[in-house]
Image (cartoon, rainbow, N blue to C red):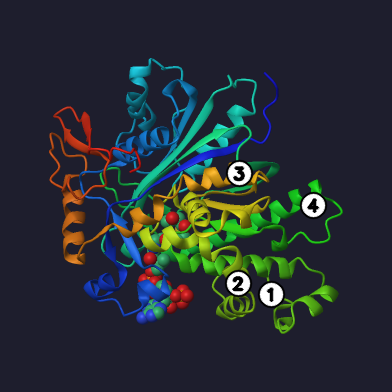
């Protein structure tokens, strides 16, 4: 077997809840000032799951849909990795639950288990999948990187930054989206910004302000390191800044933070530009000559100046990737990959051919990476790849809006029955999308069984 070339994402499947709550209505219900969630945080709708769905059911749905839509046989998968922070069992992996989908084929020879570190697990799953294919352990089959989470917060300031969803990515050689070799920059450190120490609760303990500072400082570090790696690869490059990316995707806890993050990267470029060049390239920003990264995480003056001056960078490289984040909310591990899917469904595929997409993945606690994806030059292959996502917008628009009162009641049901056994969920089955796995019951030994809503006959869910 020859050394695999162009390893990356060969197919992507996106899943979000069939029900949502409107953020304007939620502002009123919560007694928040009008515009706080919609303008202040940049969120329009928040997807959520009733007690009928858990991390296992989300993963069962997304994996089976990917294999059906792309006609992948269970025997073609040699590795399956799950990234999640929605833990329903401290020992048994979600991956082992997914093995039910492979049982009939007799394929039990599938490496990989679960990876957990807040919202970073999906990226770890993707990296592990790519690494396996590029290693001596590879046996020629595809890998599947799966990420899924139910992002729920206790009542209060963090609740509107919830969401839910799952993404599965088929990883193999000669992919339409290639993870660029040698261009991964990682930053990991110990922090208590967002964590889940209470194992009986789905809710995290969050230090909101610290979490934003950790996110921005990890972004700074990863970006500066990425630029160094780019320079090593391309020592004669005239520019090492954002010009090198045609699109930039971010982990998106809420859209406003991403808009600020683009400005933050422009500020990094500014600080890394020598003073003579700054005068011509950054007109009107001379007052920030002595500013530093460490002193400006919450500096309104820096934030506003760079957001205003470089709004075109946000508009051209990032805004289109925020569709799902704005309409569904924070999916945690799938969040940054929902950005990739949004970009693919929002931009004419011809415009992305041969382009470089930057990716920033962040998981509290903390683990972060910046890397880049090279889009194939093969127009036909890329169009075929993108067309497979033609269900995303119709599904998004066919969701059911639920009143904040009902949403709040459903959250209480989840809260009360989290880890209950025996337990039979009460959430509506008819509200789910076709082809959705749902929790049928939990027996007295905490064993979970799932059923599936009927699929649509043409196989397109
Ligand atoms: N109209 C318009 N804007 C308004 C407004 C109104 N009526 N009222 C308030 N705002 C603005 C505020 O000015 C603020 O914007 P700026 O920061 O740009 O000034 C924004 O709305 C939010 O208001 P607050 O800062 O007062 O909000 P808060 O402190 O009550 O809560 C939060 C915000 C800290 C993000 C909270 O929702 C939270 O803790 N969320 C969870 C943690 C999180 O998402 N952290 C992000 C980084 S960590 C990460 O990325 C990992 C992860 O996925 C969790």
* Marks 2,1: beta carbons within 8 A: yes
Q: How far apart are marks 2 and 1 (CA)?
A: 7 Å
Q: How far apart are marks 2 and 3 (CA)?
A: 46 Å
* Marks 3,4: beta carbons within 8 A: no
Q: How far apart are marks 4 and 1 (CA)?
A: 24 Å
Residue 231, numbered label = 4
Name the residue: 46% across, 17% down. Answer: 109
Name the residue: 36% across, 55% down. Answer: 394
Circle 1 residue: 291
Give residue 163's position: percent from left, percent from top: 34, 56
Q: Earlier in the sequence, mark 2 or mark 3?
A: 2
Viewer-nearest of discs 2 and 3: 3
Circle 3 residue: 380
Q: Which of marks 2 and 4 is nearer the N terminus?
A: 4
Q: In this view, does 258 lie to the left or right of 409?
A: right
Q: Which of marks 3 and 4 is nearer the N terminus?
A: 4
Kindly tell me whether residue 294 is visible in this rendering: no
Q: Quadrant of the N terminus?
A: top right
Residue 314, numbered label = none
Question: In which image quadrant can residue 300 be found?
Answer: bottom right
């Amino acid at each position: 077997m020859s050394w695999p070339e162009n390893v990356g994402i060969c197919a992507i499947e996106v899943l979000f809840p069939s029900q949502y709550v409107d953020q304007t209505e939620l502002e009123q219900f919560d007694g928040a000032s009008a515009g706080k969630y919609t303008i202040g945080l940049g969120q329009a709708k928040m997807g959520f799951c009733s007690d009928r769905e858990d991390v296992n059911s989300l993963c069962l749905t997304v994996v089976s849909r990917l294999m059906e839509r792309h006609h992948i046989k269970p025997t073609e998968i040699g590795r399956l990795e799950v990234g999640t922070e929605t833990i329903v069992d401290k020992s048994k992996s979600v991956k082992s639950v997914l093995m039910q989908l492979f049982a009939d084929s007799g394929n039990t020879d599938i490496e990989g288990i679960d990876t957990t570190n807040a919202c970073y697990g999906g990226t770890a799953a993707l990296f592990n999948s790519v690494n396996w294919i590029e290693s001596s352990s590879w046996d020629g089959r595809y890998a599947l990187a799966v990420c899924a989470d139910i992002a729920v917060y206790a009542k209060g300031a963090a609740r509107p930054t919830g969401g839910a969803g799952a993404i599965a990515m088929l990883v193999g050689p000669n992919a339409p989206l290639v993870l660029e070799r040698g261009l991964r920059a990682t930053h990991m450190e110990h922090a208590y910004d967002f964590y889940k120490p209470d194992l009986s609760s789905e809710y995290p303990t969050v230090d909101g302000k610290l979490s934003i500072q950790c996110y921005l400082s990890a972004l700074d570090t990863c970006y500066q390191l990425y630029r160094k790696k780019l320079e090593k690869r391309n020592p004669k490059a005239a520019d090492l800044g954002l010009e090198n990316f045609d699109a930039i995707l971010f982990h998106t806890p809420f859209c406003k933070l991403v808009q600020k993050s683009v400005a933050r990267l422009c500020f990094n470029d500014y600080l890394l530009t020598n003073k003579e060049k700054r005068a011509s390239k950054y007109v009107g920003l001379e007052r920030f000559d002595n500013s530093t990264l460490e002193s400006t995480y919450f500096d309104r003056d820096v934030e506003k100046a760079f957001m205003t001056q470089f709004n075109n960078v946000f508009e051209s490289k990032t805004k289109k990737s925020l569709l799902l984040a704005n309409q569904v909310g924070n999916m945690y591990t799938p969040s940054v990959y929902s950005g990739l899917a949004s970009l693919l469904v929002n931009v004419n595929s011809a415009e992305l051919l041969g382009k470089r997409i930057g990716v920033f993945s962040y998981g509290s606690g903390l683990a972060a990476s910046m890397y880049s994806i090279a889009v194939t030059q093969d127009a036909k292959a890329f169009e075929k790849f993108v067309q497979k996502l033609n269900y995303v917008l119709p599904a998004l628009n066919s969701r059911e809006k639920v009143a904040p009162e009902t949403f709040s009641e459903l959250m209480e049901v989840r809260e009360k029955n989290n880890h209950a056994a025996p337990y039979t969920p009460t959430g509506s089955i008819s509200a789910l999308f076709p082809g959705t796995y749902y929790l049928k019951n939990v027996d007295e030994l905490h064993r979970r069984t799932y059923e599936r809503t009927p699929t649509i006959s043409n196989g397109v869910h």
